[in-house]
Each structure stands twice: as C-alpha cells, then as structure tokens.
C-alpha cells in the first residue's frame, strides 16, 4: 500500500485544497489515491464541487461561499475531511479487482505518423514495438488533459520516448501515443505532442451517455493489434 | 422560438455557473467567464442567479426577439440599439415587442457582454449544466447565424413598444483598477525573493492569444531557482502557471482539469470577473493577499450581489 500517511496538504487558491503523496508515478501510491477518491466520493459534502485524483495527489474544489454562514475556516474542515478519509482508506482491505478493458489498435505507418521514426530511434522493428506495447497491461492512473483522456502506464523502457518538442496542431481521434513512460489515446481531435504509434476505432468518449468515458482511474487496459485491413477509423 | 441570431458575433455561447462534479473524468467545468455580470443580468430580469445566459464577445451578434421579451445586458460597456432607434443602456431592464432587433454599435470598455431573458432559456442540460463545452460542441449552445434559442415561458402580458425601466444596477467591478489579487501557489517558494518582487512589480500585458481557456501574460520574465518538472496534478480556475519561457498563464473558465507547470499563484475568485473583462493589450498588476482576505472579498461581493438581487425582485414586482 505504500507510505500513505506521509502527505502534504496545501491550498490551491481560495477554492481548492490538494493532498499530495509525493511527486512520483507509483502504482501503490496511485492505488491508494483512487481508493481515497472513492471514499471521499461516498462521503461527499455539500460544499464540494469536484474531487480530482491525479497520479499521486487528490484535489478538492470547494465553494468558499458555503462557509459564509458558519463561522469556520474551510482549511481546518477540509483538512479534517481528508485526514478522516485517509485513515478510513488505510483500513480498507484491497479486495476490488480492476476491470480489464481490451482495446484493438492498428499499428500501421499509414495511421501512426511516428511509428517508423520511433522504431528507428530505438533500433527495433515494428513487430518488436507492437509486442512490447501489447504484452503489458496498463493501469489508468488518472484522467485529464481532455474529457475521457486516460494517462496510462508504464510502458517498457525500450519504447519509452519523450514527447515532441512542439506539439502537432491536429491529432486524429483514436490516436494511440507514448509520452515518456506514459501511453494514452486521444478521445477526439485535438492538438497534442505525444508520439503516435497506432490508432483505435474504439470510442473513448460519448457525451450522450450517463457514463461518457470508457476509461476511468484504476481501470486496467490491454492493447491488441489488428491489421490495417480490419481497421476503419 | 424566441431569440434568433441574425448575424453571429466573434464567439457567442450559452453559459451558466459551470459543469462541476466530472473533473475526475477530465471533463472541464467551462461556464461563465464573468459571474458578476451573469448575476446582474439575471437579477435585472428577476431570474434565479444560476439561470443560463448568453455570453458574447466583440464583434457582437445581431439578435432578433421573435416574441415579446423582457431582457437585460451587462458586462462590457457598449452602445446598443433596438431597431436602430432606441438606445439600450447596460444594466437596465428592457421590454421589447416581438420582431425587435438588438444591434451592438460600439464597445467602450470590457471584453464580454451578457444577455439574460426573463424566465430563462429553454435548453437541454448536459451533466446538470447548460454551459457550452466549446471543444466538444456539447451542452448549452454554440450560437451561429440562424441559431434559435427558445424561452422557458412567454411573458404574461403583451409589450406594445420598447420600454426601458428607469431603475438600474451598478456593477461592483471597476475596470479602471488594474490590480489583480492573488494568493501564493505551491511553487511560489521555489522563487528567489528577487523573482517574487519582480513578479509583483511587473506590469503584465495580456497577450492576443488569450482566450476562454487562459490568459497569457507578458512582462519581465521570472524563473524558479531551479527548473522544476511536476507530474500532473489538478489545476483550477485562476491558477497562475509559470511557463518555461518565464511568462505566466492564468487559467480561465475553459481550463484543462490537470497540468504540470509550476503553480506560482492563484487569482482570487473575486477578481476573476474583472480579469475576464480585460482585453488583450491591456496591462494588469498582481497584488498578494491571504486566502482569508480572498474569502472576505468574495463574501463582500456576494453580499452586494445578493442585495442587488433582492432590490431587483422588489422592483420587478412593481412593473
């Protein structure tokens, strides 16, 4: 479970507080963050607007005007709210098994503009890259950047690649990318700097449903390769 | 059918207080840029403070009321006319008959204009909000030439001619004061005293590529004592990120949910409406205050707006 009780608590302006468990991408810390997120959601207070888990931190956005009438300081109330939830989360046994979501990806240069240069950079062929990217199961550490965008990781050292120095103006929807040890899928067209190694036709975000996002923090994702003949964007 | 966009403006959208509760999925809240003006226009027509309104930029659209209407405009200081003959001042309640057109002739100051109609617009809410998510083109409504927005209710009486009420409200936001207050952020301590002073002394000019997502500022560059790379954490409206080139970026209504740039400060909630009314090319200056002071300022603002809402309700009952 990691050293969950070691955290830093700080304000983000006059309407948010963050609990930070250390600046690192670590599965056990993130597992704790997600459990804590669910605990906070279950015990949601009326002054809370949003609870946002990230890699190793969790942020509560609150309405400062909710504290107008009671003569109390939001800082001490939210600090206690966090501390209680941390304590309760530490006592929760880890029983939940993550959902595994399988996503078909077409790894072909015609739909993945960085595939060949990335292979060249790492001195591997496309087949090796495909097997390195598909053999691991990735954890969704957090959502962010775009609605439905999931930060997943961590990819094998042999294919980990820095993002482009200047982002592309338009990345097509369904593009599968790598940035450092992270991997992710663009849910819709947007600017972006990740190295694009494949594309999927799976819909990651559907605004018309009650649960618009396919991937949520704590999910497990496995990619599998589909040939270009079977791929339609 | 009730309001028709005869000619679209630069960016016209429906906005309310924002779509909260979904940021853990990366769904950013969007919402109104200037909540003070939104509350004022809603007060003027007797609406609840949270009712969705139209947010407009300059050049503004030409609008046609297809039904007898009670409306108000607020925000930027503009010269506007109904049917090219009756001047419509900002911050007043206006009654117009069906077929009237609203035309904005000139903008004197400010960046965003708000319009509310009595009883509000009839909209299909998405995740409990009517704010337009521009990037997704979902929720609210992105207005273009020919767009039509319905009303929730028609007026109970007919309006024979344009009538501008004699009473008005006053905005508590003063654009002549260029100070924007901030509280220090997590990475503030990573700046030397010299750099902190520089940040607070700079007159920052608002860049032309500023928009609803964020305000890019230009001044003498400031840097952290050593370059810091952060892993992504949540960011919020008002967060002042320090970009690698030493210039700040203030996150506004359409900001992303997470970010990794150092957070040197946060614009206080009470000053977001003012910042939202400053235009590219204008200059601002940051003044440091405590979180407690920031809360006091927000409460004072809220009190003023609540009193204005009550006063307007009483006036509306007399009409």
Image: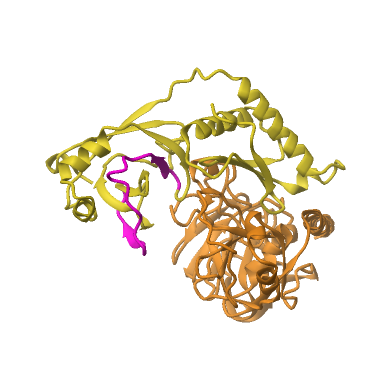
Chain colours: A yellow, B orange
Give residue B263's position: percent from left, percent from top: 60, 57
Residue B207 colored magenta? Answer: no
Residue A162 is a magenta residue = yes
Q: Residue reaching furthest left?
A: A229
Q: Residue, x 44% and y 21% (percent of image)?
A: A97
Q: Quadrant of residue B314?
A: bottom right
Where is residue B108? Give x, y as percent.
65, 81
Percent position (x, y) of residue A146? Answer: 44, 50
* Range drawn in magenta: A147-173
Query: Which sits in the foreground, B227 or B60?
Result: B227
Which quarter of the rendering shows the N terminus of chain A?
A: top right
Residue positioned 26% across, 35% down in the render: A134
Residue A218 placement, left or right of B32: left
Q: Nearer the viewer, residue A123 or B72?
A: A123
Q: Nearer the viewer, residue B15 or B223?
A: B223
The answer to whether residue B245 is left or right of residue B50 is: left
In the image, taking residue B36 as reference, residue B150 lies left or right, namely: left
x%, y% of residue A128? 18, 40
């Amino acid at each position: 479970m990691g050293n969950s009780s070691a955290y830093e608590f700080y304000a983000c302006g006059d309407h948010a507080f963050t609990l930070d468990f250390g600046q690192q991408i670590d599965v056990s810390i993130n597992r704790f963050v997600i459990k804590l997120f669910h605990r906070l959601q279950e015990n949601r207070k009326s002054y809370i607007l949003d609870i946002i888990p990230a890699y190793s931190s969790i942020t509560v956005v609150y309405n400062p005007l909710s504290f107008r009438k009671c003569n109390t300081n939001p800082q001490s109330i939210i600090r206690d709210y966090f501390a209680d939830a941390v304590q309760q989360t530490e006592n929760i046994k880890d029983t939940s098994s993550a959902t595994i979501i399988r996503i078909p990806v077409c790894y072909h240069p015609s739909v993945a503009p960085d595939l060949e240069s990335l292979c060249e950079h790492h001195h591997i062929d496309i087949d090796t890259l495909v097997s390195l990217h598909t053999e691991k199961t990735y954890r969704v550490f957090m959502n962010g950047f775009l609605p439905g965008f999931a930060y997943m990781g961590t990819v094998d050292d042999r294919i980990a690649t820095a993002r482009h120095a200047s982002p592309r103006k338009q990345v097509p929807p369904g593009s599968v990318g790598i940035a450092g040890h992270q991997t992710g899928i663009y849910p819709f067209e947007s600017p972006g700097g990740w190295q694009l190694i494949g594309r999927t036709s799976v819909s990651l975000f559907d605004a018309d449903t009650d649960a618009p996002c396919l991937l949520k923090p704590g999910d497990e994702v496995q990619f599998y390769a589909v040939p270009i003949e079977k791929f339609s964007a | 059918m009730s309001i028709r966009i005869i000619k679209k403006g630069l960016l016209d959208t429906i906005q309310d207080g924002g779509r909260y509760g979904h940021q853990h999925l990366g769904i950013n809240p969007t919402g109104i840029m200037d909540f003070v003006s939104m509350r004022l226009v809603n007060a003027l027509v007797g609406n609840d403070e949270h009712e969705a309104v139209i947010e407009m930029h300059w050049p503004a659209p030409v609008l046609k009321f297809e039904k007898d209407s009670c409306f108000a405009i607020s925000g930027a200081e503009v010269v506007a006319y109904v049917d090219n003959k009756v001047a419509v001042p900002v911050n007043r309640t206006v009654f117009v008959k069906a077929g009237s057109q609203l035309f904005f002739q000139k903008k004197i100051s400010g960046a965003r204009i708000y319009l509310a109609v009595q009883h509000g617009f009839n909209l299909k809410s998405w995740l409990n909000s009517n704010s337009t998510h521009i990037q997704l083109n979902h929720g609210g409504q992105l207005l273009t030439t020919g767009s039509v927005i319905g009303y929730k209710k028609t007026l109970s009486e007919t309006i024979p001619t344009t009538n501008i009420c004699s009473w008005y409200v006053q905005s508590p936001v003063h654009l002549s004061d260029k100070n924007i207050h901030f509280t220090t952020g997590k990475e503030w301590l990573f700046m030397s005293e010299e750099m902190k002073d520089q940040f607070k002394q700079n007159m920052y000019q608002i860049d032309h590529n500023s928009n609803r997502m964020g305000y890019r500022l230009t001044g003498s560059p400031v840097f952290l004592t050593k370059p810091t790379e952060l892993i992504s954490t949540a960011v919020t409206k008002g967060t002042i990120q320090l970009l690698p080139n030493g210039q700040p970026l203030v996150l506004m209504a359409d900001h992303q949910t997470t970010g990794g740039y150092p957070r040197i400060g946060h614009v206080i909630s009470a000053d977001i409406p003012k910042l939202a009314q400053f235009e590219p090319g204008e200059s601002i200056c940051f003044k440091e205050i405590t979180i407690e002071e920031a809360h006091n300022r927000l409460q004072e603002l809220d009190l003023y707006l609540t009193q204005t809402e009550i006063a307007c309700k009483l006036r509306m009952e007399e009409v």
